[in-house]
Amino acid sequence: MCAGPDAFSVGEDGMDSGLDGGRSEIEASPRDFSYGETKGSIEISGNRTSLTNVVKALGEYLTSEEDQLRTKGVEFLSLVLSHCPVEKMNRPSVRVLTAFYCGKLDDTETIIPALKGLSTLATLPTCSSTEAVTIIQTIFARVKMNTLVQSARFYVFSVIDSLVARHRDALKAMGTTFTAGYISLAEGEKDPRNLLVAFAIVRVILIEFDISAHVESLFNITFCYFPITFRPPPNDPYGITTDDLRLALRGCLNATPNFGPLAVPVFLEKLTAGSPSTKRDTLQAMSACFPVYGAALARVSARKLWNALKLEIFQPTDPVTEEEALKTTQVLVTTIYSEEEKALELNDDIQGLARDACEECIQILGEPEKSQARPAIKILCAFMATTPSVSRYVLSQAVPHLLKLYMSPDEITNRAPILSLLADLINAAPDSLPTEAQYPEVEDTAPLITLKDEILGAVSTGLQVITSRRPALAVIKALITTKFLLSGEELAFVVHLVNEVLQADEGDSEETSQMVLDVLATVSAFSARHVQEQTLPLLFSSLPDDAPERGAANERAKSWRVLKTLSTLCVHPELFEILVIRLMAKVDVVCLPTKATPGDSEHIAAYAHALLKTIADTLQSKVGKAHPDVAKYIDRLIPNIYNLFIYSALLSDEKEMVATDPRLVSVAGDIIRLVSQCLPLQRQEVYTASIFEAFSSGDVRTIAEGLRKIPPDTKLLLFKDSAPKYHKNLISLFTAGVVTLHKEVRPPVPELGAFLEIALTWSLNRAENELQRESVLHLISSMVNKRPQDALVFLNKMLDQFWQQKIGDPMAPLEQRQQAIKAWIWVSKALVVQSHAMANSFTDRLFDMFDDDDISWGAAKAVGDVAASDLVLTRQNHANVKVLHAQKFVNAILPRIIVGAKDSSSPRKQTAHLVALTSLIKAIPRVAYAHQMPSLIPLLLHGLELPDVNIRANVIDTFLAAAEGDSSEHSLVSQHASTLVTSMLKNSMVGEMSSMRVRIAALQYLGVLPSIIRYDILHPYKATVIRDLAKVVDDPKRAVRKEAVDTR
């Protein structure tokens, strides 16, 4: 090979002195060695030298008798080659280098660098099929895999993988030589990094090469790894997972049908004797392999496979394994019958496994109350998703059998389980129905079409008995969701049956009532007309025009149930329109002026609130489902809302008006908000201009339309000093339509900063209740969030003047300072959610008040309030909300809070930091503070000693949230077990803790402790806990007593 360099047909450019510098370059340190090969590849890339010159420079080292020099020489050449541009490598160069590297494979000192060089050559486009065959033959002849380390074996597999990918035809031409050689080479490999490549090579060989003479050998080197038991080591830098190897091996197992006869016994053995993990892996492999192994083998092996599979279904080790066994059974049946599907026109044509298994399961269903009936119906349902012929056969056998059982006098007590089984079977039927493209007359081919009358007859009797009502409803829902099954008349009959249940007052459970609603909602999705014509009149007639009296508890409860039902059913656009018309009519009637004396209108307000809340809840559901019809109610509903409440407010000076109740005004604002947030940009601009004009001028007739006409000479001036309280409450209806503005919609005010100052002043000095105050603060926060650039002057004034005058001044009235902090919170929130540059300036000011005598706790709680989520600054309201804004806020502020909570130099400030900590943690997701839990736990324990019950509840809630990701092996709280047990017991005693919320939370955490703290640590406290819990069982509150019993 020493003459090799002369054969290179690359240019004879001048040699670089650095590469021709003799022995010192080769014997340099590893750093210099790397530098040399990098320099060499750069010189070649820049045409300042050639690969020939590099080889010449290395000549004496490539053939040196000293092992170290020879190894370094070949290593250097391989490294230069790996960095050499592809275009610099022509065919003669590759041919000569191939011969050179192949000659080095029998040299134990140079085999590894030679393999590195071959791995580069194998990927070059100038490497011809001749060189590929030469490389393969040499590797098979000279490389002994059992003598090589993992990295060297990896290069061997990489070379073969590259050659198989690029020179497949040449390797195929080698015939059995290649297959036999690779089998010998790959046998016994254990490293997962190498196996991933080896599996990829084997899959290609199995699919594209002639393996007839080596099936058993290939089977042996493949199935010896099944099932994969590899578990990656901790912090594995290679990132190879168990699933990576499983999927790669599975790709080999299902690569050829020739493996079938050999694989089935292995599968059965692993399935019978394996662990749950092995069973699941085996079942998944069987599912992947059966379609490839073919129908003939599946048919021959069907009985053995079925006996093994049904054991995993009827006696499952766990639900996941059972599910996998059902899937494998599906695949097996599909494999057997899919090829002959067209020939199976009659049920009698079904023979073999499907028939035998179906008969076996139907026999088990003869005792529907037994536990084995449930797995049997699961198998039949699995068969329904195989082929149409099998599905038809299952339905034709199972459904009549269940109906016959249902009608049998001997099975009257078992009707509920029979109907439950029938519901499962019908639910599976849609998966087996033919598509319209396959059968245009699909209605005539539905498998259940001839049985539906009998089924409807069964459910009509089942609905009359409370014990069978729920499964009967499940059957009805299954029938409705089966395409092309029920006609319009039959749907109407179903609605009639369900309406009878809806009217019955026999003490149905909550689950049954929910199922009734679910069935009716399902019907409305398919055909709203039947619900509209039959159910809605029934429900609306059940609602009284007048509010139920205070003492009419049953009538009031019935009205509430009806309204809940309407809210669930009327999400459909057609039904919602009727709901709005009918309920708003009742609201108008209920809110008419009354002669009742003050104090008598509470029950009327409650009824009106329930009516409006039903509309709001239904709207919320529609908005969540992005219904396009919501926007049209800006014209059909909102003017009526404005008219009702404005008219009532104007008339409230003369008499008491129900619609002036702040709770009604609030829910009306929710309705306006939900509708206005769905408006397109252009429509929102028009709407915004109209409400600004109406509320600023006082002429509200342009936005209010309804039965009660507002006198033309009447003005509603909310911002006047003399405005009555009920007039001012309507500010909530104004802000509800403004907080939803798109960022692109500019508020129609001359100067935004001045408008915000007026609004802020009004909220502090003129607002008379929380509804008015919060409404204005929502308005300010929304505008600052969406148009911060227009509010810069306002924001700077808040920092410079407002803070000092309204909050920082200790001589200012306490109530004023507290209300000013609330305003500060909402402005800060507007900046924090958009990660604005001024956000830190606002939140930092709160820490300045931690040492204040009067408002330190208020300022500390405000830190958490700033981070808390709300219904105003949301994406639904088109607010400017940045991703991970909460995480960014926490990262900036939590370390500061922790430091302050540990600093005992100022007890007041330390307590304030603890309050801020509990408030913040309650407001943010667990993931934002989980990494800080070890340092937070001592501080949280200190927080349990604070007198504020809300803080204590927040602390315990934090411990409960942290427990969700904790375990006894890696518990964060084990070292604090004594303190936690003592504190939780103390907080669960009614004599020590007045708050029921805290007592329940403490008991819940006591119940969690055994699962997150080792037994040996917790056991010493067992007697104390049980003794004290015996006292808590006598708590005056039932909810606390129940929690104490569960905890004990």
Image: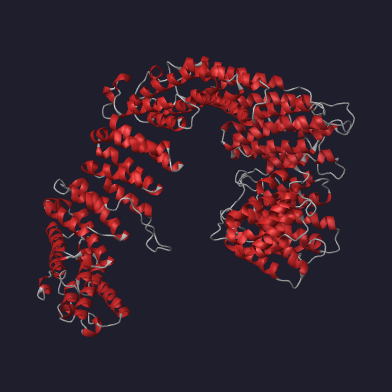
When asked about the image quadrant of residue 264, the answer is top left
Give above or below for 174 relative to 331. below
Left or right? Give the position of 349 relative to 947.
left
Q: Position of residue 602 (x, y in %)?
A: 82, 32
Left or right? Give the position of 877 relative to 19.
right
Give above or below for 675 relative to 49. above
Of residue 376 and residue 84, the one placed in the foreground of this image is 376
Q: Position of residue 346 (x, y in %)?
A: 31, 19
Left or right? Give the position of 475 relative to 899.
left
Q: Position of residue 298 (x, y in %)?
A: 27, 35
Colour style of the rendered protein structure:
secondary structure
When asked about the image quadrant of residue 865, the answer is bottom right
Which quadrant would the N terminus be assigned to in this image? bottom left
Of residue 779 and residue 602, the one placed in the foreground of this image is 602
Q: Position of residue 620 (x, y in %)?
A: 63, 36
Give above or below for 526 relative to 203. above
Say whether residue 823 is visible.
no
Say whether residue 741 is visible.
yes
Give above or below for 971 relative to 305. below
Q: Residue at x 26, y 39 (%)?
A: 292
* Figure label count: 0
